[in-house]
């Protein structure tokens, strides 16, 4: 199929075979494919395969079935607990059929590495966008130091975070002395 200009990584599923096909191993290097027809949109193919043409063991078989496009996606190599930050070593590549990729499935490791799991992730499972978030650096209810700096002075006081915050987030803080947000 690759010689016909079709993309690499296709998964083939033979169908419609009523009896088992056996091909003598000494003829495997003499296999020719003829009349190959592939419809990727419908996910079907058909062809004739000629085994050892011109010999006494020659056979012509009609093969048909389904053809699936595949893609490699990053999946966890181990269980990742809720709140754990995903590192590059936590992922491996897995080949999956593109028709199994639903909306929201992350297909690039850069979308997963450095993120915190919002739920437990099992090894080999596809990771959805809702399964990870930027790691929380400030937890709701945590004590924080509020600092105001200028070229002439520095003021600081204690505050309490009113919401969770990740790097780059703006979070509301209640000043413990003035009780203002």
Image: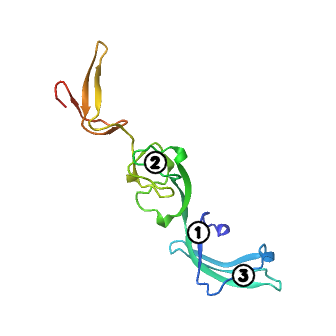
Q: Residue furthest top?
A: 152
Residue lying at 72% horizontally and 81% vertically, measured from the top left: 22
Quadrant housing residue 20: bottom right
Where is the N terminus found, in terms of image quarters? bottom right
Q: Secondary structure at mark 2?
A: helix
Q: How many marks?
A: 3
* Residue wearing tag 3: 22
Residue lying at 75% horizontally and 85% vertically, measured from the top left: 59
Badge 2: residue crowd in 10 Å (few <14, some 14–19, many ≥20): some
Residue lying at 48% horizontally and 52% vertically, measured from the top left: 79
> If you read the primary sequence from the N terminus, does the residue marked by circle 3 or circle 1 appear first?
1
As drawn, the label of residue 111 is 2
- In this rendering, which labeled residue sits more in front, label 3 or label 2? 3
Real-space CA distance between mark 1 and mark 2, rounded to the nearest whole angstrom? 26 Å
Marks 3 and 1 close (CB-CB < 8 Å): no
Marks 3 and 2 close (CB-CB < 8 Å): no
As drawn, the label of residue 11 is 1
Colouring chosen for the image of the structure: rainbow
Q: Position of residue 118 (x, y in %)?
A: 38, 49
Real-space CA distance between mark 3 and mark 1, rounded to the nearest whole angstrom? 21 Å
Q: Position of residue 125 (x, y in %)?
A: 48, 58
> If you read the primary sequence from the N terminus, does the residue marked by circle 3 or circle 2 appear first?
3
> If you read the primary sequence from the N terminus, does the residue marked by circle 1 or circle 2 appear first?
1
Q: Position of residue 47 (x, y in %)?
A: 64, 80
Reply above or below: 93 against 150.
Answer: below
As drawn, the label of residue 88 is none
Residue lying at 29% horizontally and 25% vertically, measured from the top left: 145
């Amino acid at each position: 199929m690759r010689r016909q200009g079709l993309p690499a990584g296709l998964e083939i599923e033979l169908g419609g075979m009523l009896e088992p096909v056996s091909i003598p191993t000494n003829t495997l290097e003499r296999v020719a494919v003829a009349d190959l027809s592939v419809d990727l949109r419908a996910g079907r193919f058909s062809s004739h395969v000629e085994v050892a043409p011109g010999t006494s063991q020659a056979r012509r078989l009609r093969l048909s079935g389904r053809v699936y496009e595949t893609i490699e996606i990053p999946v966890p190599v181990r269980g990742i607990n809720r709140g754990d930050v995903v590192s590059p070593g936590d992922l491996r590549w897995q080949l999956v059929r593109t028709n199994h990729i639903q909306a929201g499935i992350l297909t690039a490791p850069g979308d997963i590495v450095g993120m915190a799991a919002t739920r437990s992730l099992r090894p080999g499972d596809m990771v959805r966008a809702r399964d990870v978030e930027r790691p929380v650096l400030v937890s709701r209810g945590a004590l924080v130091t509020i600092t105001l700096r200028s070229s002439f002075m520095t003021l600081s006081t204690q505050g309490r975070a009113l919401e969770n915050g990740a790097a780059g987030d703006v979070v509301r803080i209640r000043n413990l002395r003035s009780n203002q947000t």
